[in-house]
């Protein structure tokens, strides 16, 4: 439980790896995470939950099978549950994610990144 303000820039400065979300807080059974992304992530979907992306820095494109949505700092997009998607970042982007705790980032527990708390 956070008892003081959380500085997202400081949390993001603490790691360099891409596509490896870090949990910075918990909220009502959800992880509040930051992630650095660059390049293409894998096509995937989440059958049980929506997927929220909020861009903090840079530009992120969420590719869907029928269209693409490009996000800039301060913009968010929610991918509905069950919709296949792939985040793409041509240059490094910083993103805030909110997901139910335990949600695999690839939609599959066997291929997902482990939960990292910072």
Image: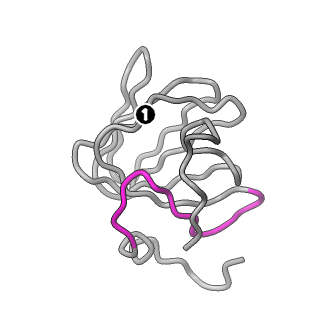
Q: Is residue 21 magenta?
A: yes
Which region shows up in magenta?
15-29
Horizontal arrangement in the rendering, residue 20 relative to residue 60 (left or right):
right
Residue most toward the left? 91
Element assignment for label 1: loop
Vertical side of 1 occupied by 48: above or below: above
Task: Where is residue 76? Give x, y as percent.
Answer: 46, 44
Horizontal arrangement in the rendering, residue 56 relative to residue 47 (left or right):
left
**Residue at x 35% of width, y 51% of height:** 37
Task: Where is residue 17? Give x, y as percent.
Answer: 36, 60
Horizontal arrangement in the rendering, residue 83 relative to residue 55 (left or right):
right
Task: Where is residue 41? Give x, y as percent.
Answer: 39, 38
Image quarter hosting the C terminus: bottom right
Image quarter hosting the N terminus: bottom right
**Residue at x 68% of width, y 65% of height:** 26
Q: Is residue 23 magenta?
A: yes
Q: Which residue is mark 1?
A: 42
Residue most toward the right? 28
Residue most toward the top? 66
């Amino acid at each position: 439980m956070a008892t003081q303000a959380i500085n997202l820039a400081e949390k993001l400065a603490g790691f360099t790896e891409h596509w490896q979300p870090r949990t910075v807080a918990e909220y009502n059974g959800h992880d509040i995470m930051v992630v650095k992304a660059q390049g293409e992530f894998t096509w995937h979907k989440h059958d049980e939950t929506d997927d929220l992306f909020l861009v903090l820095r840079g530009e992120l494109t969420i590719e869907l099978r029928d269209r693409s949505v490009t996000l800039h700092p301060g913009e968010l997009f929610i991918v509905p549950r069950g919709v296949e998607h792939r985040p793409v970042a041509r240059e490094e982007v910083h993103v805030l994610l909110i997901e139910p705790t335990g949600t695999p980032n690839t939609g599959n527990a066997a291929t997902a990144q482990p939960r990292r708390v910072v």
